[in-house]
Amino acid sequence: MNRRAAGMAGGLAAAVPAALFAAFAGTALHRQEFGAIGPALPLGAVGALLLLASLQLFLGAAFRTLIPTALCGALCYALAGWWSGMESGKRLIAGDLAGSIWVYGIVVVTVGMLAWCRRYSR
């Protein structure tokens, strides 16, 4: 196995646990709100997206290819979509403002990180 293929395999192996961590932690974090003044702001969803972006940036910089970054975003989005589409009573992500920011923000963050990490590609 050549060096590039070994790096790609390592990137894919790192992207899966990173995506699982981002999906679980982001789903747990996205409902946190800051409501000291006026209406509550869903800062947890913003924090969850920053967590995902930092993991994707690490994957892009460490493995010098876009595939782990894309896989991390796609897997995280698939899990969040599955959890938001479950039947009532079992749903982990509600269709409110915080849930929408978290689920749809995953796509925006992933596209942004793919554009940013393109500079690290060989």
Image (cartoon, rainbow, N blue to C red):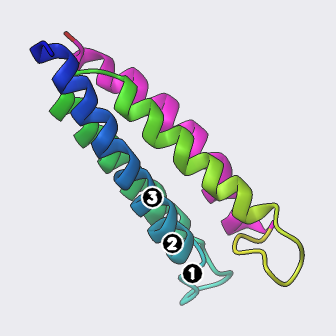
Identify the mark nearer the N-term, 3 or 2: 3
Between the residue at mark 3 and the residue at mark 2, the CA separation in whole angstroms equals 18 Å
Characterize the magenta stretch by its predominant secondary structure: helix
Q: At x 38% / y 33%, what residue is drawn?
A: 69
**Magenta residues, start to end:** 95-121
Helix, strand or loop status at disc 1: loop
- C-alpha distance separating marks 3 and 1: 23 Å
Q: Indicate which disc, 3 or 1, sits on the residue closer to the N terminus.
A: 3
Considering the numbered disc 2 on the image, is that residue within a helix, a strand or a loop? helix
Q: Which residue is mark 2?
A: 44
Instruction: Label 3, secondary structure: give it.
Output: helix
**Residue 89 sits in quarter:** bottom right
Q: Which residue is mark 3?
A: 20
Question: In the rendering, at what x and y percent does residue 85 appear?
Answer: 82, 61
Amino acid on which disc 3 is placed: Leu
Circle 1 residue: 33
**Residue in the image at 54% along x and 81% along y:** 32
